[in-house]
Amino acid sequence: MVDILHRRPAAPTHQCPPMTIPATELCDWYGRSRRDLPWRDPAVSPWKILVSEFMLQQTPVARVLPVWTQWVTRWPTPSATAAASPADVLRAWGKLGYPRRATRLHACARVIAEDHGDEVPRAVDTLLTLPGVGAYTARAVACFAYGQSVPVVDTNVRRVIARAVRGVADAASPAPGRDHAEVAALLPDDGRAPVYSAALMELGAIVCTARKPRCTVCPLSRCAWRERDYPASTTPPRPAQRYAGTDRQVRGRLLDVLRAATSPVGQHDLDLAWPADDEQRQRALASLLADGLVRRTGDGRFALPGEG
């Protein structure tokens, strides 16, 4: 496939007119081509959609699917999740990474169960008061769980808007006010806004991708970037995020030991999980203790929160 992201830019001969993304084109394509993801089932509860949004943050769909399925089967409501121990929640989170998301989801479940009658709030402003719920997640739940016409903007949506509407290869740095206004201006006012929002995300996820966009199968009849002959990216490529050897990997190894244990473990057991670098291991352990993901027992051993 030709690398159209970094080809030599053609000199523009005219100013492109303002572009839009027609709702019918996009929604019809989504109906034909969307991935069959379980949290998109109309029968799925707002709580299960909220769980999916927590898990999908910085994590690929393929890794989320089995964990989400097991989670919502085991804990189908906020109150069921709230009744679980922090240790059980961290074990169920497994290898999804960024385990503080699990403890925030647990805290979120408690607030919903105790303060909102075990029902996920509908209003964006109320959703924003929940632990772990930011601007994107609040709008995603309002839109996808409750069918509200609110702009939902993630990295995929920002990239589609940058290319199809503004005619540039990359989105600018996030700016919530601008980003929400751009998407809000595109939303149809005929009840299809939730489908349109989901379709924008899906287009960015499977067609208008960051590195190898599949422009030959794009459903849009007009695209400002295509009409400008794909001007090159002006943003330096981001270096690939390294995981091997990082503190994140060490934290994961230490948590693996504790998740597998049925009782508190000693320092020696943690030392064996990462013997290569004592200083790094101690730094990672200190950060887990500070984050509340690990606790020290009275006899100096280590356990997941709520255990030992």
Image (spheres, grey):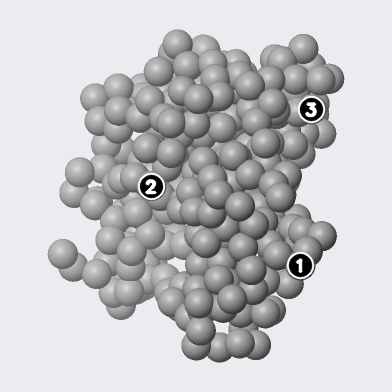
Most foreground residue, 264 or 5: 264
Q: Is residue 34 left or right of residue 236?
A: left
* Mark 2 vs 3, N-terminal side: 2
x and y percent of residue 60 in the render?
40, 50
Q: For the point 64% across and 57% down, which residue is it?
A: 264
Disc 3 residue type (three-letter): Val
The mark that comes first in sequence, 1 or 2, is: 2
* Crowd tier of the residue under label 3, counting other residues whose Cα lies within 10 Å: few below 14, some 14–19, many 20 or above: many
Is residue 291 at all visible to an observer of this figure?
no
User: Would you say the residues marked 2 and 3 are in contact, meaning their CB atoms lie under 8 Å apart?
Assistant: no
**Residue in the picture at 56% in, 66% down:** 254
Residue on which disc 2 sits: 63
Q: Position of residue 50 (x, y in %)?
A: 59, 29
Where disc 2 sits, the SS reads helix
Q: Say the numbered circle drawn on residue 300.
A: 1
Query: Mark 2 Cα within 10 Å, few/some/many (few <14, many 20+)?
Result: few
* Residue 208 at x, y percent in the picture: 34, 50
The residue positioned 48% from the left and 49% from the top of the image is: 94
Q: Which residue is mark 3?
A: 111
- What type is the residue that disc 2 sits on? Arg
